Image (spheres, rainbow, N blue to C red):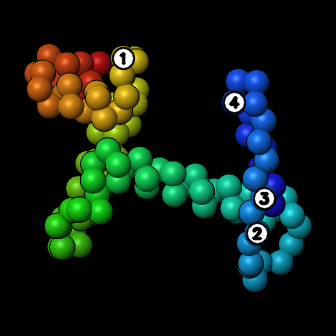
Amino acid sequence: MSRTHHQQDKESTEVSYYISSLEGDLERLSQVIRNHWLIESHHWVLDVTFKEDEGLIYAEDGAKSMALFKLMWLNLIKAHPSKDSIAGKRQHAAWDDKFRAEILFG
């Protein structure tokens, strides 16, 4: 599978090779691969923003509850119109009650 990236006036192409037991057309396999990397990029954002890999919650229900809470908080942060980064908005919300209320309640 090859991907072409366009950034301003530059173009680059990247080729990736996959081994799979899936049978079918290339379009279906391409969609499966894109969906996988979409999920991986989402996990990367959660790990970088909330340091999920460093979490010490071992109870299954607790881990699920915290993951749901972090996902909800991430979506609220992304929806806020501020131009700051996700990490910047998160830090600002931790320091400023008014900003945190803006994120939570609109």
**Among the 4 quarters of the image, the one containing residue 65:** bottom left
Q: Amino acid at mark 2?
A: Tyr
Is disc 4 placed on a helix, strand or loop?
strand
Q: Pointers 2 and 4 in contact (CB under 8 A)? A: no
The residue identified by callout 4 is 7
**Mark 1 to mark 3 CA distance (whole Å):** 36 Å
Q: Nearer the observer, disc 1 or disc 3? A: 3
**Mark 2 to mark 3 CA distance (whole Å):** 7 Å
Q: Amino acid at mark 1?
A: Ser
Q: Which mark is residue 15?
A: 3
Is disc 2 placed on a helix, strand or loop?
loop
Is disc 3 placed on a helix, strand or loop?
strand
The mark that comes first in sequence, 2 or 4, is 4
The quadrant of the picture occupied by the N terminus is bottom right
Residue 99 in view, yes or no: yes
**Mark 4 to mark 1 CA distance (whole Å):** 24 Å
Q: Pointers 2 and 1 in contact (CB under 8 A)? A: no
**Mark 2 to mark 1 CA distance (whole Å):** 39 Å
**Mark 2 to mark 4 CA distance (whole Å):** 23 Å
Q: Which mark is residue 82?
A: 1
Q: Is residue 58 above or below residue 11?
A: below
Q: Pointers 2 and 3 in contact (CB under 8 A)? A: yes
The mark that comes first in sequence, 2 or 1, is 2
Q: Amino acid at mark 4?
A: Gln
